[in-house]
Amino acid sequence: MVPALRFLGGACRRARGEFPGGFPRAGGPAPGRPWPLCWGVRSGSTSSFDIVVVGGGIVGLGTARALILRYPALSVGVLEKEKDLAVHQTGHNSGVIHSGIYYKPESLKAKLCVQGAALIYQYCNQKGISYKQCGKLIVAVEQEEIPRLQALYERGLQNGVQGLRLIQQEEIKKKEPYCRGLMAIDCPYTGIVDYRQIALSFAHDFQEAGGSVMTNFEVKDIEVAKESPPRSRDGMKYPIVIKNTKREEIRCQYVVTCAGLYSDRMSELSGCSPDPRIVPFRGDYLLLKPEKSYLVKGNIYPVPDSRFPFLGVHFTPRMDGSVWLGPNAVLAFKREGYRPFDFSARDAMDVIINSGLSKLVFQNFSYGVNEMYKACFLGATVKYLQKFIPEITTSDILRGPAGVRAQALDRDGNLVEDFIFEGGVGDLGNRILHVRNAPSPAATSSLTISGIIVDEMQQRFKL
């Protein structure tokens, strides 16, 4: 099962003389630098693979890597619509390695996160990828938050999170001298990392194992072929046709989609159900000025509101030494709308007409208004941050980057919190697997999620 054409990035770089020795084989890239990139070399308009993975984020790349390592005889290709890999949710998150404390015991989220965090640390050690296990405090600043904090602590113990402790004011001060709080959960296993660097390392592993990565390939159609491709010796061995906006074609036996913000549209494109719909939420971050970074040593989080999947505005140190404050959670009117006024008519109408957004807004109107208010007025966010670190002032912060979260929402207005993997029916549906919802902590859980997806592929596709 060897394809007629492979798109090996290392080979194309060597051909141009940019990397005479190809990709580095061990130890990772220099600290703070991503893996060298060269993807998407194509010859002709049609190529064939046993399995194609649609989506070049951390979940898609992790899945492709796990698949080819488990089944090295298969030809596997990754399709990504952007010119680079891992530039959307993977490249716009806070970089936290979550411990697994938040999630409902026995849920897939809880199991995958606890296992995934251990595997991420192990992988970074093996590949020489820098990270910091700086820990996290979940801090109760009001008396009424303490019962929720204690319940969260018990949940973390049930989930098997390592090293959890309930600490009082004196120990809070020892760990975070500028933080005030009545009680906190100390989560020493929480860390920070550059997830895009991990994703690019997955891509490197995948290519080293013989996989192919094609960028600038925006999928516009997935269908069952009606006839064999011209000059093909394989006949209908590759019955699935994937077409892009440039009318190029990729043929394959099976498809798995890890399309993130477009997971519902990718499902609908292949004739499967579009529900649950993806509703994009933009999270805006603030930056603590460098001269004030001493105020924060590790991650500082509020006690979360269990009604929402968002963890609240928090303090997050970054690998480059900066400190991010945020994010908020406001509705985005474009699926990749990282600026407040980014707008797509199709995306906006999709959210308003086809999702359960109106019911969500009705049920949580005051919360939404408060998030919008904080997004518009810097002073409102600073006032909230001062509950934890009173020394912070408006003059200490700058507006920073933003990310967009792919939040699955059902038609009743319920936020879908756990992972969803779905196939379809018929000739096409039986050959496709959609990762419909991979919410936070998908990056932390990427190595375990990829294993689950490959297990599902093995069962569905009889690999």
Image: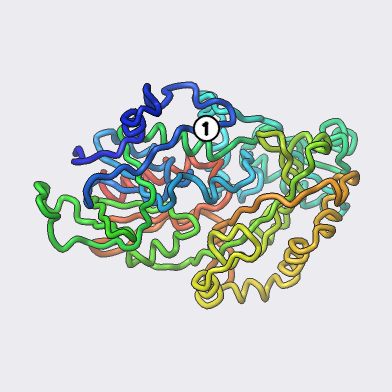
Answer whether residue 130 is visible to the viewer in this image: yes
Position of the N terminus, as image quadrant, is top left
Q: Residue at x 24, y 56 (%)?
A: 240
Query: How many numbered discs sit on the rendered protein?
Result: 1
| Residue neighbourhood size for the residue with mark 1, other residues' Cα within 10 Å, grouped as few (<14), some (14–19), many (≥20) | some
Give the vertical position of 249 relative to 169 (above or below): below
Question: What type is the residue that disc 1 sits on?
Answer: Leu
Q: Does residue 316 appear left or right of residue 12 in this picture? A: right
- Helix, strand, or loop for circle 1? helix
Tell me: residue 132, above or below residue 383.
Answer: above
Could you tell me residue 361's position as x and y percent?
66, 73
Report the residue marked by disc 1.
119
- Kindly tell me whether residue 430 is visible in this rendering: no
| Residue lying at 15% horizontally and 63% vertically, measured from the top left | 226
Quarter occupied by the C terminus = top left
x%, y% of residue 115? 54, 37
Q: Residue at x 64, y 53 (%)?
A: 402
Residue at left offset 68%, top offset 37%: 318
Residue 448: give x, y in percent of width and height: 48, 40
Residue 164 in which image quadrant? top right
Tell me, what colour scheme is on the image? rainbow
